[in-house]
Amino acid sequence: MASKELRVEPLVAEIPRLIDWLEAGCAAEGLAEDATLQIALAVEEAVSNVVNHAFAGLPPPYLIIVRLDITSQLVAVEIVDNGHPFDPTTAPDPDVSVSLEGRSPGGLGIHLIRGMMDRIRYRRDDDNNILRLEQVRR
């Protein structure tokens, strides 16, 4: 089992470094390119949400840690942050039948994550959000 961890500053500019690290970790474990792309998109969206929303009105220090665990059967990514509590597993599905012009902003990122990952779990532990994204290796 490969297990890696990366600390990310709460800046949009950090996301390319995170995705490069994630893709390298997946490639080193022989993960298929399409699976790696799906995981990278889901992680990018989740971390972007943390960077853009989790710390509003909170004093530093801010914490974002991404953990990557890959086994022969499963790829799991945990995103840990010390921002405001937010459980994306309870967010309602967006109404995708509404045109973009008629739609309220937000909600599509979580919808994308749900479509890319096999399982999404959330827990709050010691004032930290812990979002676990899992994809079964095929």
Image (spheres, rainbow, N blue to C red):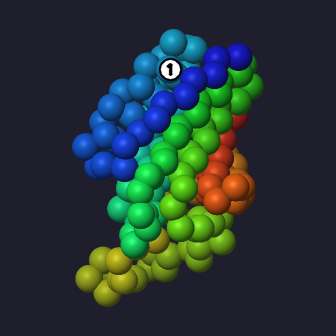
Q: Residue 92: x and y, percent?
A: 59, 76
The answer to whether 61 is drawn above or below residue 104 in the figure is: above
Q: Residue 51: x and y, percent?
A: 38, 56
Question: Which quadrant would the N terminus be assigned to in this image?
Answer: top right
Residue 109 visible from this viewpoint: no
Residue on which the image places disc 1: 25
State the residue at coordinates (41%, 25%): 21
Q: Nearer the viewer, residue 19 or 94?
A: 19
The answer to whether 64 is drawn above or below residue 31 in the figure is: below
Instruction: Residue type at mark 1: give it.
Output: Gly
Q: Residues within 10 Å of mark 1 (few under 14, many from 20)?
A: some
SS of the residue at dot 1? helix
Q: Nearer the viewer, residue 13 or 82?
A: 82
Q: Quadrant of residue 56?
A: bottom left
State the residue at coordinates (36%, 62%): 52
Q: Residue 113: x and y, percent?
A: 53, 54
Q: Residue farthest to the bottom?
A: 102
Q: Residue 10: x and y, percent?
A: 37, 50
Question: Which quadrant would the C terminus be assigned to in this image?
Answer: top right
